[in-house]
Amino acid sequence: MAELSLQSDLGIEHVGELHQVLLPHLEDDEPVSLVADQVQRVHAAGLQLLHAFVRDRSVAGRHTTVTLASSALVNAARQLALATSLGVDNTQAVNGDIA
């Protein structure tokens, strides 16, 4: 299993860095574990990239998990899920930061 440690800042200005970390593992046949204990700041763009990575791997039959998710990541994901279910524009604030 490949373990990838997520950076502490998943703000929109760091999504390119996150993309560069994830891209080489998109087609790995072995399971991938995203270790998220260091995540302190999250924007919707970071969540969207993580979601796309997990979704695309899943569609291809590849297993991906998020382990040790920090409270910042969990709270941001919950806020985005709630906003989406309520039909709120995803440009609204997520975890105190403008998404």
Image (spheres, helix red, strand yellow):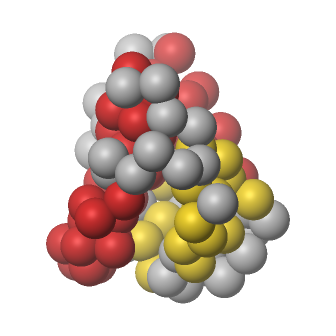
Whether 76 is drawn above or below 83: the answer is below
Residue 43, percent across and down?
40, 60
2 horizontally vs 57: left or right: right
In the rendered view, would you say 18 is above or below 51?
below
- For the C terminus, the quadrant is bottom left
Residue 97 % position (x, y):
43, 66
User: Is residue 14 rendered to the left or right of residue 28?
Assistant: left
Residue 38 to residue 93: above or below:
below
- Residue depicted at x 66% and y 82%: 38
Report the front residue among 84 and 9.
9
* Number of marks: 0
Which quadrant of the figure contains the N terminus? bottom right
On the question of residue 93 being in view, the answer is no
Which residue is pictured at 47% across the width and 25% down the height?
A: 61
Does residue 95 lie above or below 65 as drawn?
below
Quadrant of the image occupied by residue 72: bottom right
For residue 67, which quarter of the picture? Answer: bottom right
Q: Nearer the viewer, residue 85 or 3?
A: 3
Instruction: Locate residue 44 relative to residue 5 in the image: left or right.
Output: left
Quadrant in which residue 70 is drawn:
bottom right
User: 49 and 80: which one is in front?
Assistant: 49
Q: Position of residue 32 (x, y in %)?
A: 57, 55
Residue at 67 percent of width and 53 percent of height: 66
Q: Position of residue 3 (x, y in %)?
A: 61, 70
Q: Is residue 3 visible?
A: yes
